[in-house]
Image: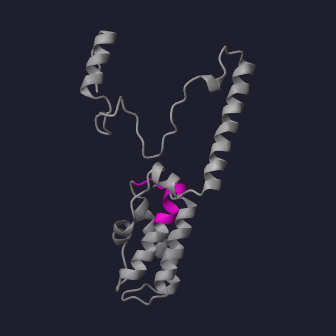
């Protein structure tokens, strides 16, 4: 059985209850809506990962779309089709208020201070803030060698050849 987050179960049950109030054709009886929600959870969690920060609003939007467009009771596939795409980290940041952006920057500065303090305690010769930091990656990011790498082929041909030349061995991709 797939992992089924509690927040998603709550959103699905809320969405289905709202659809019941529309009295669409083939609407299940009110006393089986909870069972219907369980079946929906199995269907929409099959081979999918859900992340509350990225998906809660998408789930609500999908149910709103279903309520606005369906004349008969929808199925889980229609729900998944109505689900808007995930926003990229850049799109989410553009939606943040100036206060939220400031709070995010302050949090980042506090974390850097803690890392510097830990580096001092461990006796490393460089504070953490003096070393270049990797950019924070979004959930949508994936490891790759360079901008030419893809999800299917993370190590591109040029980087593979470079690694073979430097290390003198065959690199499997």
Whether residue 12 is visible, yes or no, is yes
Total numbered circles = 0
Query: Magenta span: helix, strand or loop, mainly?
Result: helix
Residue 18 position, x and y percent, is: 50, 81
Picture coordinates of residue 99 (x, y %)?
65, 55
Q: Which quadrant holds the N terminus?
A: bottom left
Picture layout, residue 57 above or below residue 110: below
Residue situated in front as seen by the camera: 135 or 151: 135
Picture layout, residue 58 above or below residue 3? below
Q: Quadrant of the C terminus?
A: top left
User: Can residue 54 be found in the magenta stretch?
Assistant: yes
Q: Residue at x 36, y 82 (%)?
A: 70
Instruction: Pick out the residue farthest to the front.
Output: 98
Task: Return the x and y of residue 31 as percentages of the image width and height.
Answer: 52, 84
The image quadrant that residue 71 belongs to is bottom left
Asked if residue 107 lies in the magenta stretch, the reply is no
Q: Residue at horizontal 27%, vertical 15%?
A: 170
Rendering colour mode: one colour
Furthest-top residue in this view: 168
Give the quadrant of residue 124. top right
Visible residue check, residue 3: no
Residue 22, compared with residue 11, is above or below; it is below
Specify whether 69 is left or right of 31.
left
Residue located 41% across and 55% down the image: 48
Give 4 or 132, whichever is nearer the viewer: 132
| Region rendered in magenta | 48-58
Q: Residue at x 50, y 65 (%)?
A: 57
Residue 94 in picture, x, y percent from top left: 50, 54
């Amino acid at each position: 059985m797939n992992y089924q987050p509690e927040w998603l179960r709550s959103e699905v049950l809320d969405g289905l209850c709202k659809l019941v109030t529309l009295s669409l054709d083939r609407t299940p009886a009110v006393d089986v809506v909870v069972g219907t929600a369980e079946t929906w959870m199995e269907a929409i969690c099959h081979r999918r990962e859900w992340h509350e920060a990225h998906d809660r609003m998408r789930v609500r939007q999908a149910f709103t779309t279903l309520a606005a467009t369906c004349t008969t009771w929808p199925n889980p596939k229609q729900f998944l089709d109505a689900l808007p795409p995930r926003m990229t980290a850049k799109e989410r940041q553009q939606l943040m208020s100036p206060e939220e952006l400031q709070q995010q920057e302050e949090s980042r500065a506090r974390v850097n201070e803690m890392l510097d303090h830990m580096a001092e305690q461990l006796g490393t010769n460089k504070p953490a803030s003096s070393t270049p930091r990797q950019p924070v990656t979004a959930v949508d990011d994936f490891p790759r060698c360079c901008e030419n790498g893809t999800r299917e082929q993370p190590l591109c041909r040029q980087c593979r050849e470079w690694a073979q030349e430097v290390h003198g061995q065959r690199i499997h991709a």
